[in-house]
Image (cartoon, rainbow, N blue to C red):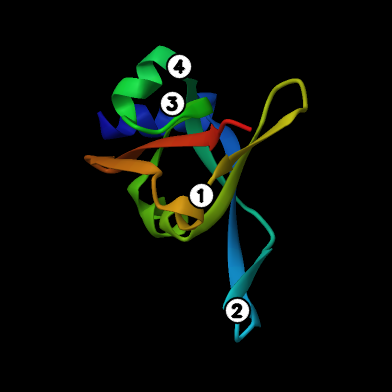
Amino acid sequence: MRKNLDELIEREGQFIYVYQGIETVDDPFEKNVVTTNLNPIPIKAIVVDFVASKAQWVMPGIKVSRIKEIYVARRYRTLLENSQKLEIRNSDGQTESYEGWRENGQMQIREEGGYLRVYIYSKHT
């Protein structure tokens, strides 16, 4: 099973870009924090689109405009938990941004064997 999923990710996967950030206190009295994003780290993943009706079952109580399910190797868990945002570039060249774990702490991460099933989303604007 593991070998098959590794081959699938290598053959059919696409790169997602994980942004980490540095937080600095802008005003020590007001405790304003400014986040500066670092250069993205590309990781290869299987990306699956979700429909809104399925999203309410996977992430109850969270209203989203877009949601994706991604499959990545378990070794990327720490990277994802320290992410500010994630970007996925579509085949037509457009970039979609999604909130990272440190942005709100509501990204869903489920460990399944040697892989992670991660639900990423962007909120309604």
Mark drawn on residue 2: none
Q: Mark 1 points at which residue?
A: 100
Q: Nearer the viewer, residue 98 or 12?
A: 98
Q: Which of marks 4 and 2 is nearer the N terminus?
A: 2
**In x, y percent, where is residue 81?**
41, 56
Q: Earlier in the sequence, mark 2 or mark 3?
A: 3
Q: Name the residue under label 2.
A: 30
Mark drawn on residue 8: 3
In three-dimensional space, the C-alpha distance between marks 1 and 2, rounded to whole angstroms, equals: 25 Å
Q: Mark 4 points at which residue?
A: 52
Q: Which quarter of the figure has residue 87?
A: top right
> Label 2 neighbourhood size at 10 Å, few (<14), some (14-19), many (20+)?
few
Say whether residue 75 is left or right of residue 41: left
- Residue at image position (46%, 31%) is 9
- Residue at image position (56%, 55%) is 84
Which residue type carries mark 4?
A: Ala
Quarter holding the C terminus is: top right
Which residue type carries mark 2?
A: Glu
